[in-house]
Structure formats: structure tokens, C-alpha cells
Image (cartoon, helix red, strand yellow):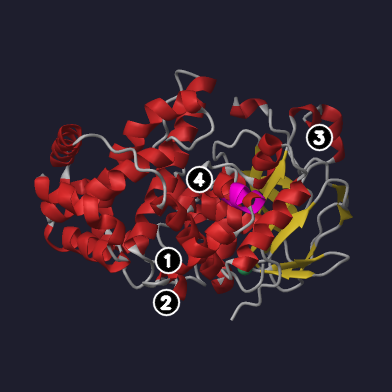
């Protein structure tokens, strides 16, 4: 099976299970879970913990009449729903785990990476912005061709990268599908994809607005600025 | 209705399996009485969960909407619930959590721009936070007596650890936001959560 070495730490897993992790970072954790049994178990345990505390909340109880009225309103709303609203069971199934992209990315790409708009930087590197509605962060897929490298760069904000397919190396280690890698501000590295396979990754970067100037973009062209006009 | 109310009075003692069976009854035969019993117990909890968000101005309008949306989903998704994977109360909590995320995001979006339509193809919380993790075996944590044990242990935690764990799980604040709200360094928040989880013996490797 897959040998995932790098996992989200307790902070990420807990915030994810509690539902408080920012959307783009939660997307990264969910991508990791696609590959990692251990972390799925942890999330289920922490969700149980959350539900125990939820069970202990002081119920916002109304009197019986109000409850009955509220229930009747709910049922008439339910009766008005079209039959199609019933969620297909297969939607919950996660077959071909190893074949497919994590389900959220499968949905975003409609199962076809080529349906996204890709931008190439040089011979080896391309990226595609994902607009998932988290305006505080830059989220994208990027691809490094087999044997190719990403230009040396310094991180200006905290960045999470999850390897989805293939593998890459930098001066520290070798990263494979499922690995969840956190780089903090100021770290330098030069990722190189393995020789035998293209490497596809998901990444999200804390992108404070003041960094999105032309100087920054020229220095680090592949970390695109959040305020790119096409998106506004 | 009296029947449902009676259930809600004694349901503090109801076993996790009781709720599992009610969800399964809704799944199998669209059992309205079972659903009403679930409603009597969980609707007030979902409202209480809405009131936990730190922005109280939002909480008021959120409570009724969150409760209705969550219970509609419980009805619509009952047939996807698998008692082998998690307890019904965990499953319902997960749905409420995801629905709260989406409602808060929708509100934030509306405040940013009024004329932006909600994109049907956009990701919603349930795309990122699965209702149930795709695990094969039920963890012991969801079993009958585990809830009692854990709650007992939560109450034995030092006050500073309880506060943080509750802030994170109920108020929907991340570690970073909790550290800002409580005026504590992020490292302190992290270590308190870690200590609490270790004491609860929840995860082997925190
Ligand atoms: Zn993991």
C-alpha cells in the first residue's frame, strides 16, 4: 500500500474534526485522508468526542406547542421536497480509492484534470488555480513533469502541500502520494519530481494581500497573486 | 406529540443504540414517529450548537435555520447512515457541523457582495468533511459505555484544558482563533489540546 510519511499534526486534525479549519486547509486535510487510514480513524474518534460534547449542551428546548409547530413546519417543508433530493447512496461510496483523486478534487475537476485552466511556467511546471471561496488563501493544483524541478523559491507565507500522484524530492526528503507537507514562511526549497512519473500536488498558501504586487510575482511567478484581475 | 415529548424527558438515559435504531427506522420506512423522536432530542441540541458560535448577532438568525437544515438532511440522508461506522449522534453532529460551516460561509459571502449568486457547483462542507469516515470497523470510542467514560474524564480535566477543548469543538474556533480570543500563545493552545487528548486516551499518537 501507500507509504504516507507526513501527516497533519494534532492541531490540523483537531481543527478539521471540529469543523473550524479554514476551508482551503480543510480541503488539504481531506485530500490526505483519502490516502491515510490512520488519520481517518483519528478524525472519526475526534468527531465522536465532538458529538459527546454536543450531546451535553444545554438543549434549547421550547415548550411542547412550539416544538410541535416547529416539527410540523419541518415536515411540510420535507413533503414539498422533490424526490430527487434524496441523496444517492453511491455518492457516499468511495470505491477505487487508489485510482481516483480525493472526492472533493474529483468534483472540482469533474473527474478530468484537463477541464481546468492550466498555466505553464517553463518546461516542467504548470499550475491551475482553484476557486473554492476562501479569499484568505491561494489554493491550486500544480504539476511537475517527470524529472523536472520547480524554481528555487522562498516561502512568503505558510504553505501546505499534499502530493496527489507521483512523487517529488527536495533537500530534506522524498514525498509520495498522500504526504501532507507544511512549509513555513522563509523556508527555501527546490522540489524535483521523480524521473519516472509526473507529480501532481494540491497546495494552499496563506496569501496576505500586501504580497500580491508585481515585484513579488516576478520573483515567484508560479505562486500567483490572489488579486489577478481575471478572478475579480 | 406527547409520545415524543415523553421520550425526550427520559432520553438522557437513552443508549447510543436507541438513536441508531431510530435513524435506521427513518431509513427503512420513512418512519415519522421515529423521526419525531429524533427531532425532540436533537433539534434543541442543534439550536444550542448554533448559539455556541462566537458571533452572537449571527447566532440568533442561525439557530432556526441550522436546526431546520440539519433535520432535513437527517431525513434525506438517513439511508446513507451506516451504524458500523459511527454512532447516530456522531453522524447527526457531523451533519450539524457541516451545515453550520456552510451557513457561516454563505453569510460571509453575502456580506462581501450582495449580488453574488451561490454557485451550485461550488464545493460545500460535505465535499470536504465526510458525514462518516470510510473506516471498516467501528472504533471503541463509539461503543455503549465509551461515551460515559469519556464524559467522566472530560470533567476531570483541568479547567484550562476543558475551556480550550470546548472552544474548539463547540464554538467553531480554530487553534489560531482560540489563541487570539483567549489571549494565549498558539503554542499554549496546542499543548493544552494535546494534553487533554492524551488524558482522554483518544488518539495513540498525538
Ligand atoms: Zn495521516
Marks 1/4: CA–CA distance: 19 Å
**Do the CB atoms of the residues marked 1 and 2 lie less than 8 Å apart?**
no
Secondary structure state at the residue bearing disc 4: helix
Secondary structure state at the residue bearing disc 3: helix
Residue B54: image quadrant is top right
Camera-near label (1 vs 2) is 1
Q: Which mark is residue A217?
A: 3
Frontmost residue, B63 versus A28: B63
Label 3, residues with CA under 10 Å away: few <14, some 14-19, many ≥20: some
Q: Which mark is residue B148?
A: 1
Q: Which residue is mark 2?
A: B136
| Chain on which label 3 sits | A
Give the residue at the far bottom of this rendering: A1
Is residue B134 among the parts visible in the rendering? no
Which percent across, then down, holds residue A112? Answer: 49, 55
Answer with left or right where residue B85 lies relative to residue A190: left
Marks 2/4: CA–CA distance: 27 Å
Give the magenta part as a residue range.
Answer: B160-165
Marks 2 & 3 on one chain: no
Q: Residue at x 73, y 66 (%)?
A: A146
Camera-near label (1 vs 3) is 1
Relative vertical location of residue A180 with respect to residue A79 in this rendering, above or below: below
Q: Which residue is mark 4?
A: B170
Which percent across, then down, holds residue B20? Answer: 27, 64
Magenta region's main secondary structure? helix
Marks 2/3: CA–CA distance: 46 Å
| Chain on which label 1 sits | B
Label 4, residues with CA under 10 Å away: few <14, some 14-19, many ≥20: many
Amino acid at each position: 500500500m501507500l507509504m504516507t510519511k507526513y501527516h497533519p499534526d494534532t492541531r490540523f486534525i483537531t481543527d478539521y474534526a471540529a469543523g473550524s479549519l479554514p476551508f482551503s486547509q480543510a480541503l488539504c486535510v481531506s485530500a490526505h485522508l483519502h490516502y491515510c487510514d490512520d488519520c481517518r480513524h483519528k478524525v472519526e474518534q475526534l468527531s465522536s468526542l465532538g458529538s459527546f460534547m454536543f450531546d451535553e449542551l444545554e438543549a434549547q428546548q421550547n415548550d411542547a406547542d412550539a416544538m410541535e409547530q416547529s416539527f410540523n413546519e419541518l415536515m411540510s417543508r420535507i413533503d414539498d421536497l422533490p424526490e430527487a433530493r434524496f441523496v444517492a447512496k453511491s455518492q457516499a461510496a468511495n470505491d477505487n480509492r487508489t485510482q481516483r483523486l480525493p472526492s472533493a478534487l474529483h468534483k472540482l475537476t469533474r473527474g478530468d484534470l484537463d477541464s481546468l485552466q492550466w498555466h505553464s511556467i517553463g518546461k516542467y511546471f504548470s499550475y491551475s488555480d482553484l476557486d473554492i471561496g476562501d479569499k484568505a488563501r491561494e489554493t491550486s493544483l500544480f504539476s511537475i513533469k517527470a524529472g523536472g524541478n520547480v524554481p528555487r523559491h522562498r516561502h512568503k507565507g505558510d504553505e501546505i502541500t499534499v502530493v496527489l500522484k507521483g512523487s517529488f524530492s527536495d533537500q530534506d526528503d522524498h514525498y509520495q502520494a498522500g504526504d501532507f507537507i507544511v512549509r513555513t514562511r522563509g523556508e527555501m526549497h527546490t522540489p524535483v519530481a521523480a524521473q519516472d512519473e509526473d507529480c501532481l500536488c494540491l497546495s494552499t498558501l496563506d496569501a496576505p494581500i500586501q504580497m500580491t504586487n508585481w515585484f513579488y510575482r516576478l520573483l515567484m511567478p508560479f505562486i500567483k497573486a490572489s488579486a489577478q484581475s481575471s478572478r475579480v | 406529540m406527547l409520545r415524543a415529548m415523553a421520550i425526550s424527558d427520559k432520553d438522557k438515559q437513552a443508549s447510543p443504540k436507541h438513536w441508531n435504531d431510530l435513524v435506521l427506522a427513518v431509513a427503512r420506512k420513512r418512519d415519522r414517529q421515529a423521526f419525531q423522536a429524533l427531532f425532540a432530542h436533537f433539534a434543541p441540541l442543534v439550536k444550542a450548537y448554533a448559539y455556541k458560535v462566537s458571533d452572537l448577532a449571527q447566532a440568533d438568525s442561525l439557530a432556526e435555520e441550522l436546526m431546520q437544515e440539519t433535520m432535513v438532511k437527517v431525513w434525506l440522508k438517513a439511508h446513507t447512515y451506516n451504524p458500523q461506522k459511527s454512532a447516530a449522534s456522531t453522524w447527526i453532529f457531523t451533519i450539524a457541523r457541516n451545515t453550520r460551516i456552510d451557513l457561516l460561509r454563505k453569510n460571509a459571502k453575502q456580506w462581501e457582495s450582495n449580488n453574488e449568486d451561490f454557485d451550485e457547483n461550488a464545493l460545500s462542507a460535505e465535499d470536504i468533511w465526510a458525514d462518516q469516515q470510510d473506516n471498516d470497523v467501528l472504533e471503541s470510542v463509539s461503543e455503549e459505555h465509551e461515551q460515559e467514560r469519556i464524559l467522566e474524564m472530560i470533567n476531570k480535566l483541568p479547567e484550562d484544558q476543558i475551556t480550550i477543548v470546548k472552544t474548539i469543538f463547540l464554538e467553531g474556533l480554530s487553534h489560531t482563533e482560540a489563541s487570539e480570543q483567549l489571549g494565549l500563545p498558539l503554542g499554549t493552545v496546542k499543548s493544552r489540546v494535546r494534553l487533554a487528548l492524551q488524558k482522554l486516551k483518544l488518539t495513540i499518537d498525538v
